[in-house]
Image (spheres, grey):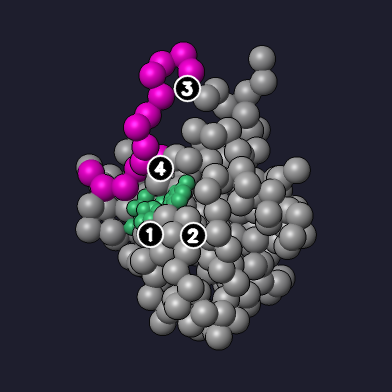
């Protein structure tokens, strides 16, 4: 069993999560509120290690009436993560999944209350979250490399995407991977489309298209 997985991102109209220099300020206040409301409703929120290295996010709930913070999860192959990042030094709990376990760094993180787990495949990681941490709903916030693996391995249930009226021209795509060949590319079903309260963004909800 694995958690129900919601991928949530805000992209430019050319499908970028960030510019080539890592700038990613795309959300209007209403979009931030939407994102934080979903954060407050899930059991865990996940990002790739690059998002931590570039943005140093806290991934807490700030712009929602319900201030319930989900567990934070970081995925890394290299384990190249500085223990001084906000995600390790501020509450709530954080779990790091790494395929390159280094006991010294793991112990340093453990002393800060961070849980470090070894993993090889995303599906095992999701099973671990479900079975050992009681995670039933997971929000995957990016970046593009992490999202690619979730989509490639068909480990998601819902995609929620806000289109912000910016054009980046280059940078980090919503999915950063080798790409699909053709007919094998996933098909989605549009569940909801709404114009954001700001009047200038669109929020789309998709689920997987089942034939
Ligand atoms: N607009 C938005 O909504 C939004 C949301 C989130 C992030 N962003 C932006 O996106 C950018 C970062 O995106 P990104 O694509 O460069 O990086 P990313 O997806 O955040 O992180 C990539 C890294 O995560 C680890 N990783 C991902 N998938 C893995 C897997 N299946 N197995 C093992 N490790 C895995 C690896 O870490 P190691 O390198 O440590 O091995 C990989 O290099 C930042 O600029 C950030 O600001 C934007």
Query: Is ligand 1 less than 8 Å from the beta carbon at label 1?
Result: yes
Q: Residue at x 42, y 55 (%)?
A: 77
Mark identifier at residue 174: 4
**Mark 2 to mark 1 CA distance (whole Å):** 7 Å
**Mark 4 to mark 2 CA distance (whole Å):** 22 Å
Residue 167 horizontal/vertical position (percent) = 28, 45
Q: Pointer 2: what residue?
A: 98
Query: Is ligand 1 less than 8 Å from the beta carbon at label 2?
Result: yes
Total numbered labels placed on residues in the image: 4
Whichever of labels 1 and 4 marks the residue nearer the N terminus, that label is 1
Q: Pointer 1: what residue?
A: 78
Q: Can residue 130 be seen in this view?
A: yes
Q: Looking at the image, is mark 1 or mark 3 nearer the viewer?
A: 1
Residue 5 horizontal/vertical position (percent) = 64, 46
Work out whether residue 83 or residue 150 is closer to the camera in this orientation and state it: 83
The quadrant where residue 104 appears: bottom left
Residue 60 horizontal/vertical position (percent) = 57, 72
> Which quarter of the figure is the N terminus placed in?
top right
Residue span colored magenta: 170-184
Residue 187 horizontal/vertical position (percent) = 54, 23
Whichever of labels 2 and 1 marks the residue nearer the N terminus, that label is 1
């Amino acid at each position: 069993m694995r958690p129900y997985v919601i991928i949530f991102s805000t992209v430019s109209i050319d499908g970028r999560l960030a510019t080539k220099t890592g700038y990613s300020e795309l959300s209007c206040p209403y979009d931030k509120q939407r994102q934080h409301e979903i954060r407050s409703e899930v059991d865990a929120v996940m990002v790739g290690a690059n998002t931590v290295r570039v943005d140093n996010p806290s991934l807490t709930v700030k712009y929602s009436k319900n201030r319930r913070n989900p567990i934070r999860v970081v995925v890394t192959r290299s384990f190249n993560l500085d223990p001084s990042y906000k995600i390790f030094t501020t509450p709530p709990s954080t779990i790091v999944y790494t395929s390159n376990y280094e006991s010294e760094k793991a112990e340093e993180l453990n002393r800060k209350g961070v849980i470090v787990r070894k993993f090889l495949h995303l599906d095992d990681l999701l099973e671990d979250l479900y079975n050992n941490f009681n995670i039933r709903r997971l929000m995957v916030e990016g970046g593009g490399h992490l999202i690619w693996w979730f989509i490639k391995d068909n480990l998601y249930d819902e995609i929620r995407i806000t289109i912000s009226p910016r054009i980046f021209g280059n940078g980090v795509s919503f999915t950063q991977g080798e790409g699909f060949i053709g007919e094998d590319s996933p098909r989605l079903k549009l569940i909801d489309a709404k114009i954001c309260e700001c009047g200038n963004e669109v929020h789309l909800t998709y689920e997987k298209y089942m034939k």
